């Protein structure tokens, strides 16, 4: 199971370097500009997301994780970053969609092992393009684990991988030696980051609202996400 670097380690490193990540309406506004931004900006907050996910049926939580994973898969494919990653990523998407659609069982452990092969070494520092492939594979692995384990933390980690891809893209374009409060706010407000967070919030609300023919609607939600690109 130890295919990835500990996400708890990633969380500590990210928090100490980049500040708190929140998926909620912005709070603590002290100026008119901040009050206006508070109405439109979204942040990624793991604890709040985990609490919301904890009351979801497992199938719906898996669908939300899948929306993040397939958006990353489409983004990685558009970059032609790693051709050998395309097939296992595509196969994993097909397996998850079939599972959501009709409960069709598949060997999630075997698919996870295939994805682990395309992951870069944990001690390496992949370039931006390779990092998208890593995030796509990791998010799909967490989605597969969400199928096996009714634990919302796997779903949170899948969502964070999608967020981090957007965050990394903006940070790279900013090209600064250090990140302070001004840079943090610029990155948060950037359309690439806000669009991904808006999509996550949209998909989260969508899986909460699903009723009736649940499987068909969950598959439709995931299909919509697969048509989207995090970097566009």
Image: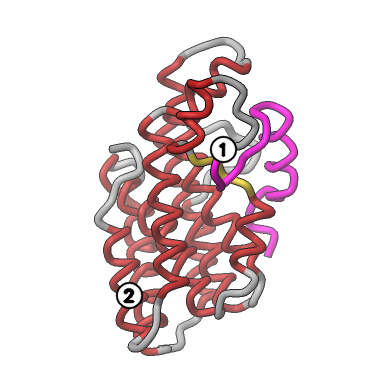
* Location of residue 162 with respect to 231 vertically, above or below: below
Task: Please give the range of residues in magenta.
Answer: 1-26
* Location of residue 75 with respect to 60 vertically, above or below: above
Label 2: how many Cα within 10 Å (few below 14, some 14–19, many 20+):
many
Q: Earlier in the sequence, mark 1 or mark 2?
A: 1
* Location of residue 80 with respect to 98 vertically, above or below: above
Residue 82 is situated, as x and y percent measured from the top left of the image, at 35, 45
Q: Which residue is mark 2?
A: 219
* Location of residue 156 with respect to 145 vertically, above or below: above
Q: Which residue is mark 1?
A: 26
User: Is residue 135 found left or right of 121 in the rendered image?
Assistant: left
Numbered circle sitting on residue 79: none
What count of labels does the image hold?
A: 2
x 28%, y 51%: residue: 228
User: Is residue 204 found left or right of 22 in the rendered image?
Assistant: left
* 3 within the magenta span: yes
């Amino acid at each position: 199971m130890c295919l990835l670097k500990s996400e708890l380690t990633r969380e500590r490193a990210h928090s100490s370097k980049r500040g708190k990540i929140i998926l909620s309406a912005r709070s603590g506004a002290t100026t008119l500009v901040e009050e206006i931004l508070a109405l439109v900006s979204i942040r990624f907050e793991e604890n709040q997301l985990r609490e919301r996910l904890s009351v979801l049926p497992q199938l719906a939580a898996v669908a939300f994780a899948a929306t993040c994973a397939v958006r990353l898969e489409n983004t990685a494919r558009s970059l032609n970053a790693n051709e050998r990653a395309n097939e296992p990523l595509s196969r994993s998407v097909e397996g998850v969609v079939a599972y959501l659609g009709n409960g069709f069982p598949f060997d999630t452990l075997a698919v996870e092992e295939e994805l682990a092969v395309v992951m870069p070494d944990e001690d390496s520092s992949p370039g931006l393009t390779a990092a998208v492939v890593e995030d796509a594979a990791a998010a799909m692995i967490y989605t597969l684990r969400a199928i096996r384990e009714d634990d919302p933390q796997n779903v949170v980690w899948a969502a964070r991988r999608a967020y981090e891809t957007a965050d990394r893209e903006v940070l790279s374009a900013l090209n600064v030696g250090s990140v302070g409060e001004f840079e943090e706010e610029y990155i948060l407000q950037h359309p690439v980051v806000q669009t991904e967070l808006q999509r996550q919030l949209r998909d989260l609300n969508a899986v909460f609202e699903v009723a009736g023919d649940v499987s068909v609607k969950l598959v439709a939600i995931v299909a919509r996400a697969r048509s989207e690109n995090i970097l566009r």
